[in-house]
Image (tube, grey):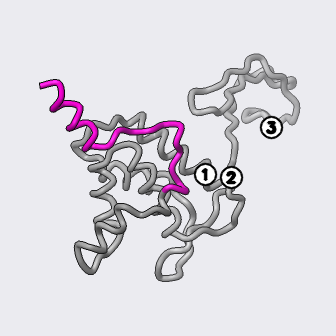
């Protein structure tokens, strides 16, 4: 690490702290001029390129996923922390696949699976915008898509809306 004040290449680390975002902050002191400065280290992950419907390729963007999820859960009882966790699960899933490129349709299915676990209404909202349907029957078939089960993490089950309504009606 070069000193930002004198350019000397040697320094010593005085303090190391882990940041909330996983980065590492280090307080350093230059051996030459004795000036102190801080550095932040972050992990660089190589996300795959996304192949869009029209064949274009673009870099993966956590922000785009977050905005899509945020739009789907608008006015729904889903916290920002839950959205952040969903984005992290999607991003980890992408990294663990180990591919250089991935279809946007596959990512869309993963997003739908995450939404299905978070909030049924948000899932339906996202599915209706994300996919284009010829008729109502095709929409219903998509909502009941068995392929989504491949993307669902069963360690965090969600009650269906119908089960909640049934439980509430029994209380009355």
Residue 113's tag is none
Residue 96's tag is 2
Looking at the rendered image, the quarter that the N terminus falls into is top right
Residue 93's tag is 1
Mark 3, other Cα within 10 Å: few <14 / some 14–19 / many ≥20: few
Mark count? 3
x, y (%) of residue 11? 84, 27
- Asked which quadrant contains residue 40, the reply is top right
Residue furthest to the left in view is: 172
Q: Nearer the viewer, mark 2 or mark 3?
A: 2
Q: Magenta region: which residues?
A: 149-172
Which SS class for mark 3?
loop
Q: Residue at x 27, y 50 (%)?
A: 121
Distance of label 2 from label 1 (alpha carbons): 5 Å
Q: Residue at x 39, y 50 (%)?
A: 115
Whichever of labels 2 and 3 marks the residue nearer the N terminus, that label is: 3
Distance of label 2 from label 3 (alpha carbons): 35 Å
Comparing 145 with 42, the one in front is 145
Comparing 83 with 119, the one in front is 119
Looking at the rendered image, the quarter that the C terminus falls into is top left
Distance of label 1 from label 3 (alpha carbons): 37 Å
Q: Residue at x 57, y 50 (%)?
A: 91
Residue furthest to the top in view is: 14
Residue 2's tag is 3
Q: Are marks 2 and 1 in contact (CB under 8 Å)?
A: yes
Whichever of labels 1 and 3 marks the residue nearer the N terminus, that label is: 3
Residue 112 to residue 117: above or below: below
Residue 106 to residue 62: above or below: below
Which SS class for mark 1?
helix
């Amino acid at each position: 690490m070069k000193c930002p004040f004198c350019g000397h290449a040697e320094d010593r680390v005085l303090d190391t702290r882990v940041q909330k975002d996983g980065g590492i902050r280090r307080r350093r002191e230059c051996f030459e001029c004795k000036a102190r400065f801080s550095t932040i280290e972050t992990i660089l992950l190589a996300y795959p390129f996304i192949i869009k419907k029209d064949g274009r390729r673009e870099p993966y963007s956590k922000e785009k996923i977050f905005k899509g999820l945020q739009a789907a859960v608008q006015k729904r009882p889903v916290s920002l922390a839950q959205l952040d966790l969903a984005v992290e699960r999607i991003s980890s899933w992408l990294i663990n696949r180990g591919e250089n490129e991935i279809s946007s349709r596959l990512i869309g299915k993963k997003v739908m699976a995450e939404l299905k676990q978070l909030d049924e209404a948000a899932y339906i909202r996202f599915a209706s915008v994300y996919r284009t349907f010829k008729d109502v029957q095709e929409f219903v078939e998509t909502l009941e898509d068995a392929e989504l089960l491949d993307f669902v993490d069963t360690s965090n089950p969600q009650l269906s809306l119908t089960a909640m309504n049934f439980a509430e009606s029994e209380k009355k």
